[in-house]
Structures are given as C-alpha cells and as structure tokens.
Image (tube, coloured by chain):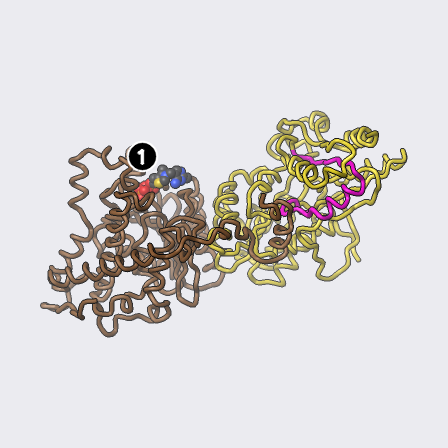
Chain colours: A brown, B yellow
C-alpha cells in the first residue's frame, strides 16, 4: 500500500461538501469502479457468466449512502455496489494511507475488519463457499443485518420493484420503535413502472415513513428508453401524487446528490416523511456486459454518455477545489485497484460451496423445521 | 370455561400474543377501529394503538413486502387478507420474497398471513376460493388450516411464535358456527401435527377445515351401515405429518381424500401420491378424492351447493370405497 499523502488545501476551505466526506467518497467511488473494471474484464473473457456494471452510478450510490449513519438501512438492487461498499466498509482501516487522523468515525469503529467483508462480498459474487449465501444465490441477492456493526442491508430478489415495499417495512419498524433512523432504497427508472413502486410510495406517504427512494435514472431499462417507460416529465413529479417530497438532481454532481440526500435524511429523521429522489445518470454501459443492448443506443448518444463519467467529474472537482492533485488522484485510483485485485484473486482461489448447501433447510429452526425434515420427500431426497 | 366460537378463538390468539410479545403487530385493511371485515381484530386497536394494529391502504403486495421488511428487523407481523382470494395480489411477495429469504441468506421471517377462505356463502368466484395448493407448492411456507376453535386458537398462537412464514387458512363458514368450551391459559397446538378426529377401522378420510365437519357427519352416517370410518384432520398441510396419515392408512387400507379446493393439482393429489408411494402394500382399494369440480365458484347458492364437496358426496364415495 502506498505511503500516506493527505491532500494539501491550497486555499481556504472551499464551498460544498465537507472535505472529509469528499475524501471518503473519492476512495469508495474508485473502489466501486475498480471492482466493475475487474468484473467487466472477466465477463468479456467468459470467466463470469454475467455482469451488470455500475459504471456511471458511483456518484449517486456513494453520494447518497454517505449521508446515512449507523443502523440506518439500505436496500439495494443490481447497480448499487457503491452503496454496499459505503455501508459496509471502514475505509480508514482498508486504506490507512489515504486517510487522516480523525477520519475514522464512530460507526467505522463498530464495523468489522473491512478486508474480511470485502473478501466475503467477492466470494458471494463468484457463488463460492465463503459468500454471504454460500453459493445458493447470486451477486447482490442477499442481506446482511448486523445491528452490532451498524449494518442493515437488505439486498434484492430478481423481481425488480419487489424490494420497495420491503424498504418501506424497514422504515415502518423504525416508526414503531420510535427511533429516528432512515431507510434508503434504490431502484432503476424501469422498475418504477411496477405496482410495488406505487403501493410502497403510497403507503410511505400515508404513514409518513422515514424512507428515501433513490431512482437511478440511467435512461434505459434493458433496451427500453424513457419514452417507452413513462410519460411524465420527471419521475419526481410523481412525489406530490403520493404526498411525499420529490426532487430530481444531476446524479453526477456530488454536492447536489449529497445535499439532496441530506435534506431527505433530515425529513426522515424529523418525522416529515418520505422522499423520492431521482438522480439522472448517463447510460455508460449496456444492460449486462456483452448482451448487445448498448449497441442499440445511437452512437452519438452513447458518446455523450461516455463523456459524462462521474469519476472524471468528481476528480476534476477535487483538483479544482485544491483537495487533491493529479498525483493524489492517481494514488487513490491505484490503491483502490490493488485492493480489489487482491480481493478478487483471493475469492477466485476459494472453494466451491459444499454440495449439501443445495439441500439446506428452508425453515428456521423450530417446530415447522422439524416437521419438514421428517417428511418422506425429505428423507428420500424428493 | 367459556363457549368460544372459531372467530373468537382467532381474536383471543391475536390478543394473547400481542400481550405476550411487543414485537407482534397486525396489518390489514379495515382492521383498526372497524376490527376487520369479519371483526376478527375487534378491540385490539383500542388496546394497542395505531402502530400495532395498522390499517393499510387497499393493497396486498405492498403489505406483504412491508411486513417482510419489518420481520427482518425483529418484528412479528400478522397480516389479514380481507378475503383469501385477494392474496393473489400479494402472491409474488409471498412466494418469491417471503418464502425464499431463509433459504437464500438465513434470515428468519416470522410472519403469519391470515386468509379468510372458503365457500358456502354464495359469494361468487372471487370470495370463495380455497388457495392452499398455491402455497403448499412453494418451499419455505408453512400452510395450516385449523378446523376447530381449539386449534384455531392454538395454531395461530404457535404460528405467531414460529420463526417462519405461516399461511393460516381460516374458514369463513366456521367463524360463527363452530363453538367450543375452551379453558383459560396458554393453549398451543403444535404445527406439523395431524389429529385423528374420529377413530375407525375400515376407511380413512384425510381432510381439513370445513370438509372435516362434513366428513365427520358422513362417517356418522356410514357407522349406521356398519362401516367404521377414521377421520384424520390434517391441520397442517405443509409440512405434512406423514406418520399420522400413514399409520391410519396402514390400519384401514382404504383412503378417501376430501377437500374443498378444486380437484386438479389440488393438495389431495399430493396426499394421494405420498400414500401410493409409502402405503402401496397396504392398500385394498383406489385412493379416491372428493373435491370441488374444476370450475370457479358460482354465485347462485344452489349452483354453488351443487359443486361443494358436502356430506352427501362424501357419504356416497365412502359407500363405494367400502365395497372394495
Ligand atoms: C419484475 C421483473 N421483470 C423483468 C425483469 C428483467 N429485467 C432485469 S433488469 C431489467 C431492466 C431494469 O431497468 P431499470 O430498472 O431501469 O434498471 P437499470 O438496469 O437500468 O439500472 C429487466 C427488464 C426483472 N428483473 N424483474
Ligand atoms: Mg435504467
């Protein structure tokens, strides 16, 4: 790991987001990008079956989830690696050289060793024994609820839209417990057409749930463009219809994303209710790597999107504000790449799941689980 | 001892479990001040308030999904579908989200989904269905259907305490017709255990819920003709208590399966398959079924009665089976 090289502010504290948050965000966004680069490369040569890239989403996923605290919850879908990394990891222990004294938060101190969690995540994505599901479900299809770590993460099922009511239920539990915790859910713009989107946001409005639903609007769902997905001007226009707050922001503008999220968290914590936060994103990749969906987008349009890389913009902003120089940017990029490289190498060297995992219990221990195991269909293996 | 109806038993179970455990809460349509379409929750809102007896908007999928979210962080939601038929609007959440969570990432999902179901009221195609097979087919769901006030009480309490999702089928026709003297105290009925409701020697009936009572009436009829019928109340359909079922079948060597749901791919088909597999050497006759014809439930009461598998049809089937 490279030596410590904290950024040297050249001018008085700049306007915008707290530099400590930006420092953390930079590393997490780079970590997310490094992960995608590695998995995209593996998808291209067929080393993994399928990869849904989050390239282009990093500023939104990291910028929103960095506004949360310990035991606020996140509910993620398929392009939310940035949010998962932000929620799980203590970056000050993962890349100590990149951080300064005082960067470690109280929540960081609660979190487990970051390397182990990252390894587990990598094993999960490869469907290996060491993953969160030990091989029974794919990539981000799991949850991790560890109140003692301040981590409350509920991952996805394939059915898009289905997790929005679940996120609402996490928020409902906060309301019942009378605490001030918020819940952050993510969804693509395509899945906003699902009935569950409507049911959950309507419920969130009626019950004033401490819920923030972030729509990652990357203008396409698989191959379907916005014009065939919905007919309103902005998706946040739906918010008043549910009696909740709504905003649309440039999902590449870190200050704007983070500030909008902070406002939403404030509303959640003070009993003002839910927020629908739409973040506009460029479609920088196709639906899944190599599935041909990107080629359907007109080349000129694609070019525009590829020019809007959130990391390029973020790093230019850091340099502009004298929070980093080119060297520092390179260093963060290299360290993040190295960390991911190592985690992927280690995960690929781990073992396949035990075959017995396939027939592990469908019921949590108790009367029902015992009765289930007694059946002839179980004894004979079905 | 106090005479308790089937629906009183449900209300009592809800009340006792809410008193016992702060994490238990109710969600459903019109269940708060109104007490629910059948008043099963009557009085609980006044006692426990709007955060534990939650009136939801008119939705099913959103309700099941939200209950899952709450269950994942330590709550024990008990949902009421206004009618079992409407559970189809929450089907995806139940079979894909709720049922699969424990297998996927080992997070327990304590949840009870109450389904007021069944016919006999001339309520038509959308207020009369028996949907147990939809759920019994899905790994990860426990499916129960109590027949008596005692079991309605004991099984609901057990279901609320179990760390798994339980589909609780409560028959609307039994709500105010079935009555029993029930003692005070913490009365539990184990899940996954069938019950021999009537002992007999010549034929076994496998059944549950409303058709249990019709089967008992038919058994009484056959007794007059010298045929001794054993009636097994399955109570829990999934997971199945095969010990009790196979023991009875091996004793009588003849099986009649009776259920209110439509016949094709009904839960009776599963029972028939398991009996054929595990009791083949003991059988002295065909494994027969009496069930609903493969039709939606018609509205006119006379039409509906013509399809319901009541005591006459059961009696006729028993007579034929007894002749083998
Ligand atoms: C209920 C459901 N229907 C269809 C699909 C298949 N599918 C997977 S991803 C996808 C597109 C999702 O688009 P969007 O919500 O905009 O997210 P994005 O991939 O653009 O980030 C579709 C149609 C699905 N996963 N779930
Ligand atoms: Mg999209």
Beta carbon at label 1 within 8 Å of ligand 1: no
Residue at position x 26%, y 49% in the image: A57
**Chain containing the residue with disc 1:** A
The x and y percentages for residue A196 are 43, 43
In the image, the segment drawn in magenta is: B235-261
Quarter containing the C terminus of chain B: top right
On the rendered structure, is B284 left or right of A318?
A: right
Rendering quarter of residue A314: bottom left
Q: A75 or A97: nearer the eye?
A: A97
Q: Is A147 contained in the magenta span?
A: no
Image quadrant of residue A351? bottom left
In front here: A125 or B262?
A125
Residue A190 shows up from this direction: no
Counting from the top left corner in percent of width and height, residue A303 is at 16, 40
Q: Which of A21 and B196 is in front in this view?
A: B196
Residue B293 visible in rendering: yes
Graded by Cα atoms within 10 Å as few (under 14), some (14 to 19) or many (20 or more), the crowding at tag 1 reads few
Decide: is A203 above or below A317.
above
Residue occupying the point 29% across, 53% down:
A61
Q: Does the magenta stretch include residue B239?
A: yes
Determine the secondary structure under disc 1. loop
Question: Looking at this rendering, what residue extends furthest in the left direction?
Answer: A10
Q: Mark 1 points at which residue?
A: A231
Residue A370, placed above or below residue B129: below
Residue B273: image location, x then y, percent = 66, 36
Seen in the picture, residue A381 relative to B287 is either above or below; the reply is below
**Residue B127 at x, y percent in the picture:** 62, 35
């Amino acid at each position: 790991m490279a030596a410590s090289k904290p950024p040297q502010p050249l001018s008085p504290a700049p306007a915008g987001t707290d530099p400590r948050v930006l420092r953390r965000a930079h590393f997490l966004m780079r970590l997310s990008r490094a992960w995608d680069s590695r998995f995209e490369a593996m998808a291209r040569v067929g080393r993994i079956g399928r990869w849904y890239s989050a390239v282009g989403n990093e500023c939104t996923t990291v910028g929103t989830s960095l506004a949360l605290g310990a035991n606020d919850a996140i509910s993620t879908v398929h392009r939310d690696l940035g949010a998962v990394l932000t929620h799980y990891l203590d970056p000050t222990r993962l890349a100590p050289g990149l951080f300064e004294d005082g960067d470690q938060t109280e929540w960081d101190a609660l979190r487990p060793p970051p390397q182990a969690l990252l390894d587990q995540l990598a094993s999960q994505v490869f469907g290996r024994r060491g993953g969160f599901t030990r091989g029974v479900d794919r990539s981000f299809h799991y949850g991790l609820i560890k109140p003692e770590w301040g981590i409350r993460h509920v991952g996805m099922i394939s059915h898009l839209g289905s997790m929005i009511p679940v996120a609402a239920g996490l928020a409902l539990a906060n309301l019942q417990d009378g605490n001030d915790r918020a819940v952050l859910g993510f969804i693509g713009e395509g899945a906003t057409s699902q009935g569950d989107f409507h049911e959950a946001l309507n419920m969130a409005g009626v019950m004033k749930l401490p819920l923030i639903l972030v729509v990652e609007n990357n203008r396409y769902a698989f191959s379907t463009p916005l014009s065939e997905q919905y007919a309103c001007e902005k998706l946040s226009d739906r918010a008043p219809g549910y009696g909740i707050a709504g905003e649309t922001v440039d999902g590449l503008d870190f200050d704007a994303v983070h500030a909008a999220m902070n406002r939403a968290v404030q509303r959640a914590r003070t009993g003002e209710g839910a927020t629908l936060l739409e973040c506009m994103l460029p479609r920088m990749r196709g639906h899944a790597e190599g599935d041909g969906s990107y080629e359907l987008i007109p080349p000129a349009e694609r070019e525009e999107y590829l020019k809007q890389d959130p990391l390029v913009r973020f790093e230019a902003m850091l340099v502009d504000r004298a929070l980093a120089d080119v060297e520092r940017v390179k260093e963060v990029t290299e360290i993040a790449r190295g960390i991911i490289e190592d985690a992927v190498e280690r995960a690929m060297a781990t073992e396949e799941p035990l075959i017995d995992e396939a027939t592990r219990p469908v019921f949590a221990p108790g009367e029902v689980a015992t009765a289930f195991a007694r059946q002839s269909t179980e004894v004979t293996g079905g | 001892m106090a005479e308790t109806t089937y629906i009183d038993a449900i209300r009592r179970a809800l009340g006792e479990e809410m008193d016992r455990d702060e994490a238990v809460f109710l969600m459903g349509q019109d269940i708060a001040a109104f007490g629910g379409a059948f008043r099963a929750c009557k009085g609980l809102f006044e006692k426990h308030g709007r955060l534990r007896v939650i009136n939801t908007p008119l939705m099913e999928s959103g309700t099941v999904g939200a209950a899952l979210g709450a269950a994942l962080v330590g709550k024990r939601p008990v949902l009421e579908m206004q009618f079992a038929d409407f559970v189809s609007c929450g089907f995806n959440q139940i079979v894909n989200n709720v049922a699969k969570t424990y297998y996927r990432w080992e997070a327990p999902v304590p949840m009870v989904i109450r389904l007021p179901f069944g016919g006999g009221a001339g309520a038509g195609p959308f207020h009369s269905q028996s949907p147990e097979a939809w759920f019994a087919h899905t790994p990860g769901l426990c499916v129960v259907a109590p027949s008596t006030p005692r079991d309605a009480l004991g099984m609901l309490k057990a279901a609320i305490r179990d760390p798994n999702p339980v589909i609780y089928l409560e028959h609307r026709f039994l709500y105010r017709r079935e009555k029993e003297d029930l003692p005070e105290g913490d009365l539990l009925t184990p899940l996954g255990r069938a019950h021999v409701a009537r002992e007999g020697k010549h034929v076994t009936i496998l059944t549950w819920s409303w058709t249990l009572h019709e089967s008992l009436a038919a058994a009484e009829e056959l007794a007059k003709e010298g045929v001794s019928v054993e009636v097994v109340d399955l109570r829990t359909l999934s997971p199945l208590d095969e010990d009790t079922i196979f023991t009875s079948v091996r004793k009588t060597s003849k099986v009649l399966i009776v259920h209110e749901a439509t016949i094709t791919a009904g839960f009776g088909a599963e029972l028939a398959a398991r009996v054929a597999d595990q009791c083949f050497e003991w059988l002295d006759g065909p494994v027969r079924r009496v069930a609903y014809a493969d039709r939606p439930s018609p509205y006119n009461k006379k039409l509906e009665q013509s399809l319901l598998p009541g005591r006459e049809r059961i009696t006729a089937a028993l007579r034929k089976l007894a002749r083998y």
